[in-house]
Image (cartoon, helix red, strand yellow):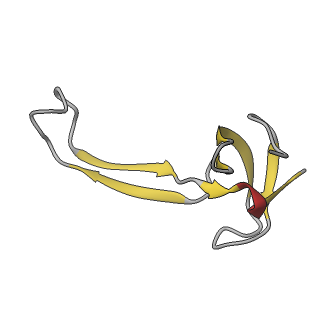
Amino acid sequence: MHVKKNDMVLVIAGNDKGKKGAVIDILPEKGKIKVQNVAIATRHKNKSSRSGGAKPGITKQERWIDSSNVKKI
């Protein structure tokens, strides 16, 4: 893996091409990374009895992207 956690990277391919951010999480066995404020996904949560009181609502979180789509800056 050519990037580490907390490295600053530039997205060079995909819908978020040209965005910069810090690496916040890595999956080296799959070659995937999460970059801060890049590839944001909206998740809708319903109240369920199994979640132990988790609040329902809309949350935004980063998606996994392939590490080959970024370069270190």
**Image: 60 above or below 48:** below
Which residue is at a point 69% across and 42% down the rendered structure image? Answer: 28
**Image: 34 above or below 14:** above
**Image: 15 above or below 36:** below
Image-based side of 29 in relation to 3, left or right: left
Residue 43 percent coordinates (x, y): 35, 54
Q: Residue pushed farthest top?
A: 52
Which residue is at a point 77% across and 60% down the rendered structure image? Answer: 68
Q: Quadrant of the N terminus?
A: top right
Quadrant of residue 18 within the rendered picture: bottom right
Q: Residue pushed farthest right?
A: 73
Q: Residue pushed farthest left?
A: 49
**Count of numbered labels shown in the rendering:** 0
Which residue is at a point 74% across and 34% down the rendered structure image? Answer: 5
Residue 52 percent coordinates (x, y): 17, 26
Quadrant of residue 14 within the rendered picture: bottom right
Question: In this view of the protein, which residue sits in the foreground, 59 or 31?
Answer: 31
Residue 55 percent coordinates (x, y): 22, 36
Residue 32 percent coordinates (x, y): 65, 51
Q: Residue pushed farthest front?
A: 29
Image-based side of 55 in relation to 40, left or right: left
Image-based side of 71 in relation to 42, left or right: right
